[in-house]
Image (cartoon, helix red, strand yellow):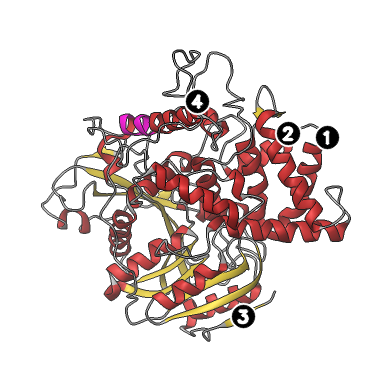
Amino acid sequence: MTSRRSPVAVRLAGVAVVLVSLLAGCSAGPPSGPASSPPGSPVPGVSSAAPSGPVLPDVAPTPPDGRPLLPVPAVVAPGVVDPPPGTGLARYTGQRPTWSRCTRRVECATVAAPLDWSAPDGRALTLTMGRVRATASPRLGSLFLNPGGPGGSGLGLLSGFSTQGLEHWDLVSWDPRGVGRSTPVRCSSDATLDRLFALDGTPDDAAEASALNSAVEGFGRDCLAGSGALLEHISTADTVRDLDLLRGLVGDERLHYLGFSYGTQIGAQYADTFPEHTGPMVLDGAVDLGDDSPVDQIQGFERALGHFASWCESQGCALGRDRADVLATVRRILTDLDAHPLPGSGDRQLTQALGVSGVVTPLYDGAAGWPRLSAVLEQALRGQGSGLLGLADAGNERGADGHYGSVATAFPAIRCLDSQARSVAAADRRAAGLERKAPVLGPFNGADVFCPLWPVAPAPKTGRLHRVGDRPVVVVGTTGDPATPYEYAGDMARDLDSAVLVTHEGEGHTAYGSSACVRGLVQAYLNDGRVPQDGVRCTD
């Protein structure tokens, strides 16, 4: 990365947090339904027929607690293969990766890993990793990178990652299981994802609640039908085992690691699982390891939106006379989208859920994203939604051709296997609390019903993570981070043994690519073993 974060790294380090909002539902206000769906294109699991019979109650019946588990079909997902020759785990640890050029600067190799790590003689899946070779001597080994997600492509990150300051390392990353060029999760069509992302996530009556729950359940069924047993084996714990396999296959005794956003979860869980194999590790944009922080993610976005509003006031933008007026304008735009979607591009409309995503996406870029956000909000005031829709598409990894990247399907599948959530009612109660914590964005956040309605049982709950081996872990937090609020970094640094906290006083998601000070501290630690002073602050 250069002094400005690579767009690839920014999007993949944070895109899943946008999807948290989208897949959990991001709209409120009067009912509108899936306004962008073309006639005759029902949302999966939602009847297009008009309701009949008794008048529905104001509140939809709450689905019973407990996930609607389904039998796992015998479908073999693409990329699930026979295991390598041999028996037990030795058949995997004895592989020799064959590297070949896959992009202008990246070499790739494909290896096998057990589909089920508890049954290494069963079926295997494929993992694709990439490498940018060291260009300076002495070579220090392999530095593994992870962009976040869950569902971010490591190969995509590697393609845009600057080697400056890290020339002594082979930079290595991989598409985790369920993602991209590794064995991917297969779910719905692009058209179905379009309808799902546009669906009203804050239902006002029984019909809208039923539509939301049916669509979410239908999406989960599609994923199970397309992916089979893979959906049971894509947890973070599985990915951590894969990472240790890859470490050994590239010939390193210890893992050297730089992880962003959800990549900090992978790193912390790796250090706790394999402390004897953990080398220097940097975790930038720390997540909430215990999922019990009093600060919710939506509060991070609310803070960042407030910083944008203050900037907007200072610039004399057209959104309002002062900070409060700007925030009121943003809320009014999003509220109006529920009943009155705006024309977008082509035959697509900007619905409320897509509007929220369009507002959230540029906040990842910090101050660099504020002029663009101001411009598209001013456009929306003039009745045109294409700008916000374009930002929503960027955050959702939707290409100009209408095709979605793998994060759109891998993210919910991985997240819901890790999650212990089983209750729609509990999700509704939590959503109500978020409206009080974040008065501007909270009302549009909606209840996270995806995991309570997921058709696959949760993976075993992970215990409290704390071990890091005999090397310090460097945890980096940014005070204005929208997606991983700064408090998470302090919590992670306290939770992990021998961790040190580096604070970036700035805006945007993650710090390595935007702060020369942070970058210098990180590189000195990785290259020379110089541990930053705990509590050091960077102000650039």
Closer to the camera: disc 3 or disc 4? 4
- Write down the residue under mark 2: 385
Q: CA distance from mark 2 to mark 3?
A: 40 Å
Check whether the beta carbons of the residues at disc 1 and disc 4 lie within 8 A of each other: no
Precedes in sequence: disc 3 or disc 4: 4
> Dot 4 lies on which element?
helix
The kind of residue on which mark 4 rests is: Ala
The kind of residue on which mark 1 rests is: Arg
Q: CA distance from mark 3 to mark 4?
A: 51 Å
Closer to the camera: disc 2 or disc 4? 4
Residue 191: image tag = none
Residue 528, given in percent of the width and then of the height, sits at 48, 83
> Dot 2, crowdedness within 10 Å: few (<14), some or many (≥20)?
many
> Dot 4, crowdedness within 10 Å: few (<14), some or many (≥20)?
some
Q: Please identify the quadrant where the N terminus is shown.
A: bottom right
Residue 207: image tag = 4
